[in-house]
Image: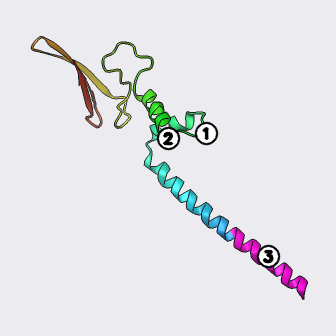
């Protein structure tokens, strides 16, 4: 009888341990999917292509900046290669001359983000 109770206790303990582990595993998967769904395809690709196992906020910012701004800087006053807001590569560039001052402008065709410099 003691052996039966012992075996029953081991089996019941195993089932309870499995249930607890499975519950936390499913919760973690839901949270990861929710986080993953918030990221655009460009951001997902940039993170997955990076070989580091962890990224600090600063490292993530630097990584994303390399996707949006030309590296190394080539003298372009607005060195964007992609929109820093939406990631689109459809950027329109121009120059405006006003009161003998040159202004360089860049605007995203998709989200209308823009930047300018003198």
Nearer the N terminus, badge 2 or badge 3?
3
Give the residue at x 48% y 55%. 34
Q: Nearer the viewer, residue 33 or 116?
A: 116
Q: Residue furthest bottom?
A: 1
Q: Nearer the viewer, mark 2 or mark 3?
A: 3
Nearer the N terminus, badge 2 or badge 1?
2
Give the residue at x 47% y 35%. 58
Main secondary structure found in the magenta portion: helix
Q: Nearer the viewer, residue 2 or 48?
A: 2
Residue 48 magenta-highlighted = no
Residue 70 sits above or below residue 59 on the image: above
Nearer the N terminus, badge 1 or badge 3?
3
Give the residue number, with chain letter if any, for mark 3. 11
Give the residue number, with chain letter if any, for mark 2. 44
Quarter of the C terminus within the rendering: top left
Residue 57 sits above or below residue 65 on the image: below
Query: Is 44 positioned to the left or the right of 73 in the image?
Result: right
Residue 15 magenta-highlighted = yes
- Looking at the rendered structure, the secondary structure element under dot 1 is loop
Marks 2 and 3, Cα distance to the nearest angstrom?
42 Å
Mark 1 burial class by Cα count in 10 Å: few <14, some 14-19, many 20+: few
- Looking at the rendered structure, the secondary structure element under dot 2 is helix
Residue 46: percent from left, percent from top: 50, 35
Query: Is 67 positioned to the left or the right of 29 in the image?
Result: left
Query: Is 18 positioned to the left or the right of 27 in the image?
Result: right
Residue 25 sits above or below residue 70 on the image: below
Marks 2 and 1, Cα distance to the nearest angstrom?
14 Å
Give the residue at x 76% y 71%. 14
Residue 117: percent from left, percent from top: 24, 21
Residue 116: percent from left, percent from top: 24, 24
């Amino acid at each position: 009888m003691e052996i039966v109770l012992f075996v029953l206790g081991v089996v019941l303990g195993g089932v309870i341990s499995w249930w607890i582990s499975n519950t936390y595993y499913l919760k973690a998967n839901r949270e990861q999917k929710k986080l993953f769904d918030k990221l655009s395809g460009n951001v997902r690709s940039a993170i997955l292509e990076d070989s580091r196992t962890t990224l600090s906020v600063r490292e993530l910012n630097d990584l994303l900046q390399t996707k949006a701004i030309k590296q190394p800087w080539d003298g372009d006053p607005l060195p964007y290669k992609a929109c820093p807001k939406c990631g689109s590569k459809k950027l329109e560039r121009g120059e405006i001359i006003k009161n003998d001052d040159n202004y360089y402008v860049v605007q995203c065709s998709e989200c209308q983000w823009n930047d300018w410099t003198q």
